[in-house]
Amino acid sequence: MHLAYPAVLAALLFCTGLYGVLARRNAILVLMSVELMLNAVNLNLVAFDVWLRDALHAGQALTLFTIAIAAAEIGIGLAIVLMVYRNRGTSDVDRLRDTAEGHEPHPINAGDSTGTARPEVAA
Amino acid sequence: MSTTTLAVLVPLLPFLGAVAGLLLGRTAPGFVRPLAILPTLAAAVLAVTVAVRQGGGQPISTATELTPTGSVPIDLSLYIDGFAALVAVLVGVVATCVQLYSTAYLRDDPRYPSYAALVSLFTSAMLLVVYSGDLMVLLVGWEVMGICSYFLVGHYWETEAARSASLKAFLVTKLGDVPFLIGLFALATDAGSFRITKILGTVAAGGLDHPTLVALLLLAGVAGKSAQFPLHTWLPDAMAGPTPVSALIHAATMVAAGVYFIARLLPVFAASAAALVVMAVMAAVTMVGSALAALAQDDIKRVLAYSTIGQLAYMTGALAVGDRGAAVFHLLSHGAFKALLFLGAGVIIHAAGTNSLAAMSRMDGLAKRIPDAFWTMTIALLALAAIPPFAGFFSKEAVLVAAEQTATGHSDLAPVAAGWLVLIAGVLTALLTAAYAARLWLMAFRGRGAAAPDHGKEPFAMTGVLWLLAVPSVAFGLAADSVADWFDGRALTPTVATSVLGTGAAVIGAMLTYALWQRATVKAATAPAAGPARSAAAAEQPAAVAATVSAATAAAESAAETPEVAEVTHEHPAVPAGPAADPGRALLGPLHRHAADGFHLDAVYDRLFVRPVRGAAGLVRFLDREVVDTYVRGAGSGTRLLGSLVRRAQTGNVQSYLSALLAGAVVLAIATAVLANVNAGS
């Protein structure tokens, strides 16, 4: 199989992931896009490992590492997103602007700050 | 103890007293009075002992070098000749009198401890000036006196007048001190030493390279310290201080330092005929001007201040004709009677409750209230007016004789012109001096009007001191022959010609004043008879009202209630309804207005110096606030502006950060690729 197919596929996947990271509002979808990018890298690693006929199969070994790290990362990431959602009632990335300079400290909470901080309890 | 040890103790004791007084003033108030009086008294006694041991013979001269100080060595040295010994006695006696007097005069003053300590320090500084044989050490005493006078004149610093007077005294004397310091350096460079003995040796050997320059520079410092024209303006204003301080500054210490300094270094001044002529002109202008101004002053202390300036000008005049014996003789007798005058004036002010001669002339029986002050003041005024046989007569005659001898060409030291200048100005001033002395006496003690307020008997510490000082004021002149032995040996006895001239002038001046005063009193007595004038000052005693004409202010105050007064003042709109019995006004005529203002010298200085300095200060303030500060503030606000621009980028949106990161990475990658290709192609 020609190298071009997996390479183009990986590039498409990476671009899709990049677009998702930069443009999606939902934090979970952002995390999924990160996964897409990681997997694009994995695909590249495996493809080039095969194409280069590396005796040590460093590419495949590195892919395993990446998968393991990605699993850990998604675990922590989803936990964070869950906690953010519980605290703020939303997981939209562009509404989490606490670090903005000169804005309200909790623009999200400004509306419903009368009730509890946990929207599922309030609901 | 050896004479040298005693002499060292003389300035040291008041200094230690001052230090102890300053340290213990708060914690141990009971010790303040002993600490003020005893060291000064001991110094006076020691000064007398030193004077007796020195005896006008060979000068005592010792020196120790504490540490090498570079090119021209500075020694701690004593140089006590007849002049130093006698002036130190004067300083000690007057300072003791002032301290004794102050215990009564300022007994209720909360700042008495610091005051007494400063007076002691002042005395110690003056004694240092008197005894020092090294010009640098002399300068230390000289400057300590300057700062002490600043503190003492500003004793009542709550009042604006005292604050500005103390600043003025300090600044004007410092204005003279700058050229003085340069002159000292120039002199020391020429002579190779600060020691007075070596300098005098160099002068005698003709080794002085720039005698005129040095003499004129030193003269500027002396003019500032001794209040000679044109640097005399601080002295009348210095009257804002307590009266004993005026006595101390005027009689024995501060102002005497300048004259004493010239007397010590007279050969340096005499080496330049030009300097002597300048000195003579200065003395003549100061003499006549201050006497005229004294005739027009209303404040009794200002009269005395101007008279001090005039008497100092006599001394400067004597020095200008090269006779330091006469100068120091006048310094001594003037020190005695002027201290008496000031302390007596303090008693008068205490009793009358006012400084104003015009107000005193509206009081009856002031002399009976304070007989001690009356008699001693009379003696001192007679001495001031140089009426024989009081002390002032002999010392002033000594000055006039010296001037006359120079004028007739009998002096090998001074130019003839200086002699004539001093002689003519001296005789004229003798007339004016007698006139203002008589005016002061008549207005203070021969007032007509309401009875003087009764403040009870004056304390003995005040009146006793007056009698003590009255003794030298009367009898010091008789010692003229023996005093001459202490000095250069030139006779100080008066000659017939100058006696007749000087005394004649004095008598004419006094008689003229008396006549004018009589006329003015009669006129004052008759003038109000036309209309029933009522004086606010004498409102309680209608019987006495007819004899007085109220002052313009008093009239204005009562004008609202009593239309008669308004009528009277309306009749003479041009003439201020001042004290009628003021012979000075009649004597000076149109000059009176200018003389009362010190010939507008303050206004001239204000125009010449104060305003340009203020303008320059305003410019500097503008440059600092508006120009320099703009850059400083711009550095801050510019950074703040940039910061607020950068803050805009911090939106808090992570995705936009990441986008920027990506864009940057892409740009970098493209740039790297392009650059790599360009480099590879080249």
Image (cartoon, coloured by chain):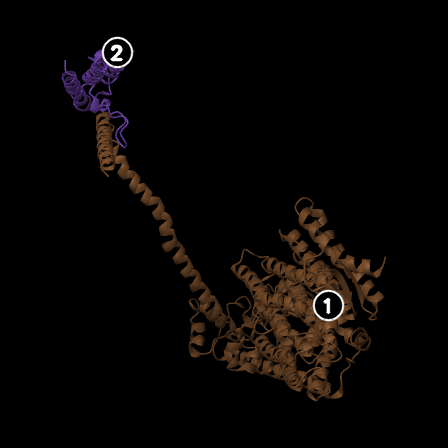
Q: Looking at numbered disc 1 in the image, what kind of residue is underneath it?
A: Ile
Q: Chain of mark 1?
A: B
Circle 2 is placed at which residue position? A60
Residue lying at 66% horizontally and 58% vertically, measured from the top left: B105
Is residue B300 in view from this perspective? yes
Where residue A38 appears, x then y in whole percent? Answer: 23, 16
Residue lying at 71% horizontally and 47% vertically, measured from the top left: B30
Of circles 2 and 1, the one toward us is: 2
Where residue B654 appears, x then y in whole percent? Answer: 24, 25
Circle 1 is placed at which residue position? B196
Query: Which labelled disc corresponds to residue B303?
Result: none
In depth, the one of B639 and B568 nearer the eye is: B639
Where residue B59 appears, x then y in whole percent? Answer: 81, 68
In depth, the one of A7 and B24 nearer the eye is: A7
Q: Secondary structure at mark 2?
A: helix
Chain identifier, purple in the render? A
Q: Secondary structure at mark 1?
A: helix
Chain identifier, brown in the render? B
Is A88 above or below relative to B61? above
Is residue B385 in view from this perspective? no
Labels in figure, total: 2
Where residue A22 appears, x then y in whole percent? Answer: 19, 24
Q: Report whether A106 appears left or right of B386.
A: left
Q: Looking at numbered disc 2 in the image, what kind of residue is underneath it?
A: Gln
Is B199 above or below relative to B674? below
Q: Report whether A18 appears left or right of B197.
A: left
Q: Chain of mark 2?
A: A
| Cα–Cα span, label 2 and label 1 | 105 Å
Question: Does mark 1 fall on the same chain as mark 2?
Answer: no
Q: Which quarter shows the C terminus of chain B? A: top left
In depth, the one of B112 and A112 nearer the eye is: A112
